[in-house]
Each structure stands twice: as structure tokens, then as C-alpha cells.
Amino acid sequence: MEHDLTIAGHPIAWRPDPARLSSIRLLRMLRRLGLPDLESLHQLAATDPAQFWQEAVIKEIGLIMRRAPDLWVDRSEGVPWTRYMVGAKLNLWDSMLEQHAHRRPADPAVIWEGENGEVALQSWMSLQAEVDRLRAGLRQAEIQAGDRVGIFMPMLPETVVAVLAVAAEGAVLVPIFSGYGAAAVASRLQDATVRLLITADGFLRRGKAVAMLETARQAVANCPSVQHVVVKRRLGQIALMANETDWLDFVAHPAAPRPDALDSQAPLMVIYTSGTTGRPKGALHVQSGFPVKAAQDLAHAFDLNLGDRLFWLTDLGWMMGPWAIYGTLMLGATLVIYEGTPDHPAPDRLWQLVERHRVTHLGVAPTVIRSLMGHGPELPARHDLSSLRILGATGEAWNVEPWYFFLEAVGGRRCPIINYSGGTEISGGILASYPHLPQKPCAFNGPLPGIAAMVIDEKGERLIGEVGELAIGAPWVGMTRGFWQDSQRYLETYWSRHPDTWVHGDFAIETADGFWYILGRSDDTIKVAGKRLGPAEAESAAVSHPAVAEALAIEVPDDVKGGALVVFCVLRPGHDPLESLRQEIHAAIVATLGKALAPKKVLFCAELPHTRNGKMLRRLARAAYLSLAPGDLSALENPDSMTAIRQSW
């Protein structure tokens, strides 16, 4: 298979400070286990998964169990249905609240900042007290273990409380993206037969009030299963309807006692992913799955420790929202959350937030950096970012220049960029970077421990140095227990192509020197005259031109070649969309990809379609350009981008 992945040819861009190696959590754990290196940890996971999960994961993250498991790993129902910690009894309340509230009651657990500058802090003791009052409210509402509870909320302190309380009571969390319209909210409430919905009257976004409760009401009107609606009044004293209860009234009960132990296999969460057609997929996760994987990844790859402060720019409806809540709090770190956008009211808002709250771990999507770097390195330089120790990125493939901006202008070359890629059904990452290993731009330097990642060809054979499909050859903690009410769809989506092999749907390459690159979703793959191309390759080539702020590449039908490359470019301020500039960008792409993969068109547009957390939606760009039915639009943050694509010139 041919490819021209120029970013793979870049040299090492960052090396760890030898003086800091002794403090890295993963290396401390390897010493505890008597293992010489990361490769030996991967081997332990492959040869003795029970010992790996017990010693390298459960002990490392501090998961408290009230009853030890009878069996650490059970594959008796087949690899796609592997269970972990079978027979164990636990409650996440013990690990995420009780142990920290007992040891460090006054330390900050959650720091919240509103877009209007409000700040609220919850100590471990106050967070536990609020969770226990909400648990009492859920009991008063007769919410039972296994009942589904929807959370349609912006990132507020009450959002964190709700996520923890629902889990502690054994109910099933259904997180819903705060930007969805009524139809998208209703489809998730209906599919999960949600009994109780927790929402807000609204939130602030770019200085404007977003009327969230009206959307929730329209959705609930079509969902007879929803019996109660709890409303957090964020914006004012809006009148409530008969089936609605003010948050303050709902939690006005004596705190519930210590929660009951739950079976490790009890359902924890149904979190929906958007599809191009059909109803959204509800990934089902269990009590001993998603939170364990989240905390493991934060410990092993992100070096998150007791007392660190993590801020990930996300929403509860995206996997990274619950991931940040569960993983950060289990490890005893402080979770920083933010209501608004990273560039309002000024383009340095994100850097202000880091400085103000002394954030140690900052996570974003690459698109956020691409949008902010246009204001120049002097903007982050105005702020004290010395608290930063780790930079994180997920959601889409990088381009080289934004990666270097993140490394240099934001991290001051002190902080590694932990590139992180996985998915909702994974409960976290497949590939990551590690703070004790050298880094190349845009690359990953290995799979997460316990993830048997590989790149395979169409026959399922492993590839090195060639582009193929990202796959996983063994089960792992955090693997979804299928799709809600649709087990067959789960098997068809991930397990149907090769025996006992999870095919993830990403286009990737593993190089001979041990670096990995994600090139975009395999269903975004571009094929020109029989040659396959990852969209990130074309986009990186376009962004290499100094006039291009952001690029998006798609395949379009071509009578001669079968498929042709079209690249949309958003220009940096101060550059006009001249024909001469178009030719320069075209030449830059050809210089990188070769004449055989020259774009049919280079087009200028005002904006590109993306989700709120910055992931580009190539399928929507393609649909808009070709006047096709767009399919599911619920994840689209900026609807005007569809018009911008159609009107590109």
C-alpha cells in the first residue's frame, strides 16, 4: 500500500529531562513490579492479564473493593464479551469520595469557572456532602439501581455531583451533549428509556444565554418514560412546570448513608456516539470498566498524581467529560471545569484559566490550538503558565505547525504533549505518548498498557511501516459491553472482520522506530487512482503554507481517477483568497504528496464544520460540497459551516 507520510520523517522534537525521570509515576510503578521497561509491562499484560490488571492497574489507581473478585479475567462467553473482576463488590463512592474526603477534607476536589468569570470551589468534604444529598433526592424520587438517569448539563459543579451520585446509587448515567437540539436529546432519552432527567435552565456561551430548559422540555414531551426533571437554575428564576423540581429543593434532604456495594458488572453508563445514518450507538459500560480505564490512562500516560490539577476542554456528552471526572477524582487530583469557550471574551481566555487555577495538566483538541495560534505566541507568553507539567491532545490528527506551537508557545518546551487516541467504546485510549520517552511531532510512542494494538492489512496481517487499519488483538478493561439493546450491531461494527480482533475504524501507521500515527477515520480515507491517502496527510501539507490556518481534505467522485482530492482552507488574518495563493497552496500539497495525489481543487472557505470539542466533521463537509443528505447533525457545533462549504470559492 503506497503512502507518503512526511510527518513520520520528522526528527525527535522533545526529550525528557533526566532529572525528572525518577518522579514519573509509570517508572515508579515499574520499579515496584520489578520490571525493567514499558515493553516488559506490555508483555505482562499479554502473558498474565490477571496479574497485570491486579498489580499494575487496580493497585496503582487505588480502586477500593468491598469484596475481592472470584476471577480477574473471564472470557468464557467469547472475547467480545470478556468480563473483569468477576464477583467483586464495590462502590465508586469509596474510591472517588470517601478516601479523599477522609484524608484531605479541605483540599480542592473541583474548581469551576463560568464564562462570566464566576469561580466556585468544592473541597473533598463539601463534594461528598453534596453527592450524598443528591443521592437522598434520587431515593426520594424512587430511582432504583439500573434505572437510567439522563444528565443534560453544561460543565457546572452540579454536573460533577450528578455524575458521582448516579454512579453511587447504582443507577445508569446517560450523559447528553449540552449543545444538542431537542430531537437529538429526545432520541437518547427514548432509546435508553430514561426515568429522570437532570438539566439546567441554561448556560453562557460567547456572552449569550443558551436556553437549555426549553430544549429539554421539547425533548421530554416526546419521552413518556421521563417521570422527573430536576433543574439547576444557572441563569435565573425561571418558572418551573409540574413535573420539574428545582435542584435546591431536590437535594434538601438529610444526606443519604453510605451507599450499598454494587456488583462489578453492574451497568454504570450508556454514552451515545453519533453515526452517519441510523440511530446513535449507545455504548454500555460497567462499574468496573470505564472508570478503571480512565484512571489507568491518566496514571500511566498522563502522570496524574495526588494534588495535580487537570483541565480538559470538553463537554459531559463527549467521552472525555465522564473520563475526566471519574479518572481525575479516583486518583485524588483536582478537576478544573469551565462553562464557556476558550476564546471569549478574549482570545487568551484559555491561558488566563491555566494561570488563574494553576493547572498542571491541560487537554485540548488540536483544532483549539490551530484556532488560537493565529493570535501569535505572544498571547500565551503574557501569562504565567509555569504550573503546566503535561499537555494533552485528543479528538483528531495533528498538523506539524500547531503541534510545535503547543510544545513551544504553551509548554515552553518543558512539557511533553501526550497525544491520546481511542474512543467512547474503548473507555479511553488505544495509543498514547509517554512523558519518559522521546517525542516526534504529531506521533504516539506506543499503545496504552493492556491494549494489544496493531496496524493490519485487509487480511488481518500486521503491518510495520505501511498504512492500514488500527486494531486491537485482545480484550481490555473498559471495553464496552456492547451497544444498548443492540448486541448484534456491536459485533458487526467491531468484531466481524477478523476473528477475535477489534477493528477500530482508524487509518494508522506503525513505523519501524516505534512511533505511531493516526491518519483519520478509515471511512474518511481518500483514494485517488488506486492510491490510499489519510486526510491528515493532505491537511498537514496544506497547513504547512504560512497563509493557511486550518484545512480539511475529502474525496470526491472523479470520472477518470475514480476519486479525487479536494482541500478546503481557512486562511489566517491578513491573507486574501487570491488565485496566486491558491496555486501556492496547491504546489505545497503536491510537493508533499507527489503529483499523483495532486488535489483536484483547493478551495477557500470561512469556516470548517467541527464539534464543540474541536473534532473536524469531514463527512459533513463532503455531504455539503456534493449536496448529499448530511445524516446525523447533532454533533455539529457551527451549522453555518455547511453553508460556508457550499459557498467555498
Image: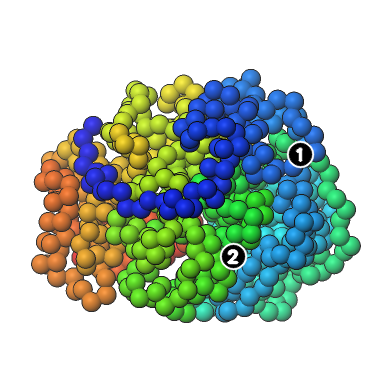
Q: Is residue 18 left or right of residue 294?
A: left
**Residue type, label 1:** Met
Quadrant in the picture for the C terminus: bottom left
Query: In the image, what residue occupies the spot 31% across and 36% down?
Result: 513
Label 2, secondary structure: give it: strand
Look at label 2 and name its amino acid: Ile
- Based on the displayed image, in which of its 4 quarters is residue 288 positioned? top right
Which residue occupies the foreground of this view, 69 or 634? Answer: 69
Please tell me the numbered disc located at residue 573. none
97 and 39: which is toward the camera: 39
Residue 630 appears in the figure? no
Residue pointed to by mark 1: 65
Mark 1 to mark 2: distance in Å? 28 Å
Tell me if residue 574 comes above or below residue 541 in the rendering: below
Residue 6 located left or right of residue 261: left
Residue at the image point whose x is 52% and y is 66% from the top: 387
- Residue at 41% x, 72% y is 380
Q: Residue at x 71, y 58 (%)?
A: 162
| Residue 248 x/y as whole percent | 79, 70
Q: Nearer the viewer, residue 311 or 105?
A: 105
Quarter of the image for the N terminus: give it: top left
- What is the secondary structure assignment of the residue under circle 1? strand
Work out whether mark 1 precedes mark 2 in sequence or the reverse, and give the earlier one.
1
Give residue 186's position: percent from left, percent from top: 60, 55
Location of residue 103 in the rendering, given as x and y in whole percent from the top left corner: 77, 56
Mark 2 — residue?
Answer: 337
